[in-house]
Amino acid sequence: MTADPFLLYGTHAVETEPVRLRAGLLSADFVNGNLRTIRHAGTEVLRAIAYIVRDRDWGTYEPALADLAIEQKDDHFSVRYSASCEGPDGSRLGFQAAIDGHANGRLSFDVTALPQSDFETNRCGFCILHPIAGLAGSPVKVEHTDGTIVDTKLPLLIDPWQPFKDMRAITHQVRPGVSAECLMEGDIFEMEDQRNWSDASYKTYVRPLALPWPYVLPAGQPMRQTISLRITGGSKETAKAIGAEPVRIEPGETGAKLPDVGVVIYPEDVEAALGNLPLLKKLGPQQLLLHYDPTRGHGRDALQAHARLAAAYPASTTLECVVACAGDLEAELSGVADMVRRAGLRLDAVAVSPSVDRQSTPPGSIWPACPPLEEVYAAARRAFRDLRLGGGMFSYFTELNRKRVPAGALDFITHCTCPIVHAADDLSVMQSLEALPFITQSTRAIYGAKPYRIGPSTIAMRQNPYGGATKDNPDGQRIAMADRDPRHNGLFAAAWTIGYAARIAPARLEMLTLSGFTGPFGVLATTGEPAEEGTPRPIFHVLQGLAALAGHLQIEMRVSDDRVAVLAGRSPAGGITAWLANITSDHVTVDTSALAGGAAGPVTIWDGAGARRLASGAVSGRLAMTAYAVARIG
């Protein structure tokens, strides 16, 4: 990688390079003590086998590895190491790990943990991730702890709860003639559908969620778990090359109109937005999503601030109104409506959600006290009589899937997503894009053709439904559940944003919000970045392009593999504009020849060398895209 990591990721910290383990047709990447991308003859069998220790807020410990020994032979590989985790109270958990892989398709991962003191955790043990591409809705065989075996299917639409419980083993078809059995020993395992959180996997994990958490591992009591993978069939195959050919793209059918682009505005960001009004106008969002939360002290001053911005930038406006539900609903919502009028705030819509619904209710937990949503929506309708009314969840699809709202009373449905709920490494964040079509399809299955909005959805987590708070990230690291993420400042976020917009385009959204304007979720640089404070981040140019495409008819693009994301739209005048993003850390060559007849004009590419404008002839051949590069054609 020749580009400055800061330009790509917003941080000089570079992820640990994985160690590729091979034994015959079996391969796996060893990263930070765990296995990723487990393949057989080049086909992904499991996305990960990982030994995970979580704290009481579901944050993930980063164990310190020691005594690491890796041995590789043609027909066998082995890994041995020790590791430890230290809790905030000084408690310690140590464990010994052994990994063995064989050319006959067998793989084992064995861990014995020993708490050196009483150790509090929400989860301690193995997580096994099955990929979703090609597996969603496919047949599997599940063996339960009582020995019964059930032939069933992985969920196609996203299951709000656990599709399988009390698991001992699960077997699936890797490809015709090849199957994989995953045997789990040492605890009770169950599976959850991680697509709820936009993870691109089904996750099988230890300790059923119906049991109490957090819980304490007693000092001095060892705990052993073993995962065994057995791949059978396909003995005469050879491993296929991964990513050797150029990515081919070509236009397909004309789809629906592309959605409006919104930006979220918090009251504390209004003055900075007003100070950068020319850039806001250049960005060109069709919608301002104005956040209002009385539980955080927002009142008439916050609404007056929003009113100043709405007057200065005449876009459509939606008030994202958190409902405290602390007393009389009628009085609370009519009071907010009265303050809106007194502040002179021009609104086109209001979206409401009870404050408690931002907190997740996992399986086995007691639902928090909350007025019936029918009453919340009715009170909001009476308070804001002339406005469109939206509802859903200001948190994530998970909560919307588990607490399905009475949509008949609403003019639109809304929810957010966040890609760093469970993992924050670069690969996991980009893989989360695979889950987005399943989220939109599942929402459509529940709510039909109801107008549908998504966002604000950013890499960083703006609120934590699963713990007491988001994680502070003052040093700009890759941290799950963090309140800010350095990659938002770099090309990584620009590529992720194109990937996001491309994946949800068939869902016929009316609005998509993937950023703020200023602040940590915004499109303008802040102190400490390579660019001067207030200058556009790479994500600015992408969102500007998405805003320019709003209302254009989507052109469905056929892409030969998922290393590149493509979003294209046809203007009323008939011209095609295509946005391409390399969503990998590798160089990718894109065959753009099929666009030559429809996408006229030059190519602009943003990469580690900055922004460059290429000649129109580049469309007729191949386009070289470095890590996380973004290109606009036409």
Image (cartoon, rainbow, N blue to C red):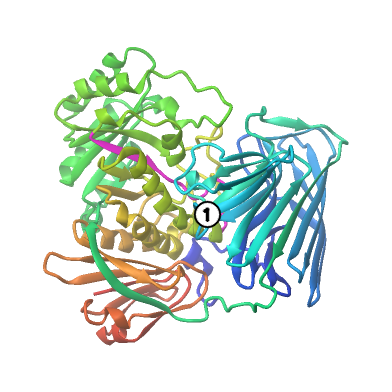
- Residue visible at 77% across and 56% down in the picture: 109
In this rendered view, identify the residue nearer to me: 13 or 50. 50
Q: Is residue 418 magenta?
A: yes
Image location of residue 377, percent across then percent down = 28, 24
Q: Main secondary structure of the magenta part?
A: loop
Quadrant containing the N terminus is bottom right
Q: Which residue reaches farthest right?
A: 220
- Residue visible at 48% across and 44% down in the picture: 196
Q: Which residue is denoted by mark 1 in the rendering?
A: 138
Q: Is residue 46 left or right of residue 460?
A: right
Residue 516 is at least partly visible in this image: no
Q: Is residue 70 left or right of residue 204?
A: right
Quadrant containing the C terminus is bottom left
Image location of residue 328, percent across then percent down = 32, 12
Q: Which residue reaches farthest left?
A: 573
- Residue visible at 69% across and 36% down in the picture: 207
In this rendered view, identify the residue nearer to me: 198 or 441. 441
| Label 1 neighbour load within 10 Å: few <14, some 14-19, many 20+ | some
Image location of residue 410, percent across then percent down = 25, 31
In this rendered view, identify the residue nearer to me: 88 or 317. 317
Q: Quadrant of residue 594?
A: bottom left
Q: Which residues are magenta?
A: 411-425
Image location of residue 213, percent across then percent down = 66, 30
Does 416 sit above or below residue 257? above
Residue 6 is at least partly visible in this image: yes
In this rendered view, identify the residue nearer to me: 490 or 164. 164
Give the SS element for disc 1: loop
Does 196 sit above or below residue 330? below
Q: Is residue 528 magenta?
A: no
Does 426 sit above or below residue 326? below
The residue type indicated by label 1 comes to Ser
Q: Quadrant of residue 613?
A: bottom left
